[in-house]
Amino acid sequence: MPTSFLTQEGYQKLQEELDHLRTVKRKEIANRLHEAMEGGELIENAEYEAAKNEQAFVEGRIKELEILLATARVVEESAIDREVVQVGNKVTIQEEGGEPETYTIVGAAEANPSEGKISNESPIGRALMNHRVNDVVRVEAPAGSYSVRILKVE
């Protein structure tokens, strides 16, 4: 199993999600199941079936989060190198003729491109890893390859 990287913020968010699923969501589902069971025939009870499906999903997500949090490597803010791109860095890049774009490199579990968080395992994240300011990096993406210059690493 490859190492999963998490920032401290990402670790905290996933831990909060796990706590919510264990304490709040499990109880909500148990109540729904109890109410559905009191509703009569379980074989034809759509609410019971929906609650059982949700319970299976929640239990799967709990297990997934437990494994992820137990095996993840948390990148400490103080350990982040500001010279070389690695998980935890904020990186500003520019494609030739394009506008500068800034991304935070995170582990796959935290990736959210709409928030500017890209995975170290994504094509662009993988290409940027271990490079420095002013390096021109070739990105091999599904839609084709292109080059970007690293303008800033923080």
Image (tube, grey):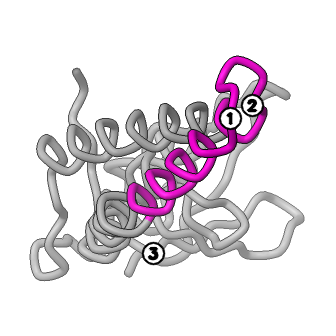
Q: Quadrant of the N terminus?
A: top left
Q: Residue at x 28, y 73 (%)?
A: 12
The answer to which image quadrant residue 74 occupies is bottom left
Per the rendering, the mark at residue 82 is: none
Residue count near mark 2 (Cα–Cα under 10 Å), binned few <14, some 14–19, many ≥20:
few
Residue 39: in magenta span: yes
Q: Which of labels 3 and 1 is toward the front? A: 1
When the figure is inspected, residue 61 is found, relative to residue 82, above or below; the finding is above
Q: Secondary structure at mark 3?
A: strand
Please tell me whether residue 69 is drawn above or below residue 116 in the rendered image: above
Q: What is the magenta range?
A: 25-49
**Residue at image mark 2:** 45
Name the kind of residue labelled 3 in the image: Lys
Can you identify the residue that label 3 sits on?
A: 90
Q: Quadrant of the C terminus?
A: bottom left
Q: Amino acid at mark 1?
A: Gly
In this picture, is 89 found above or below 96?
A: below
The label nearer to you, 2 versus 3, is: 2
Q: Position of residue 32 (x, y in %)?
A: 57, 53
Q: Which mark is residue 40?
A: 1
> Badges 2 and 1: C-beta atoms under 8 Å apart?
yes
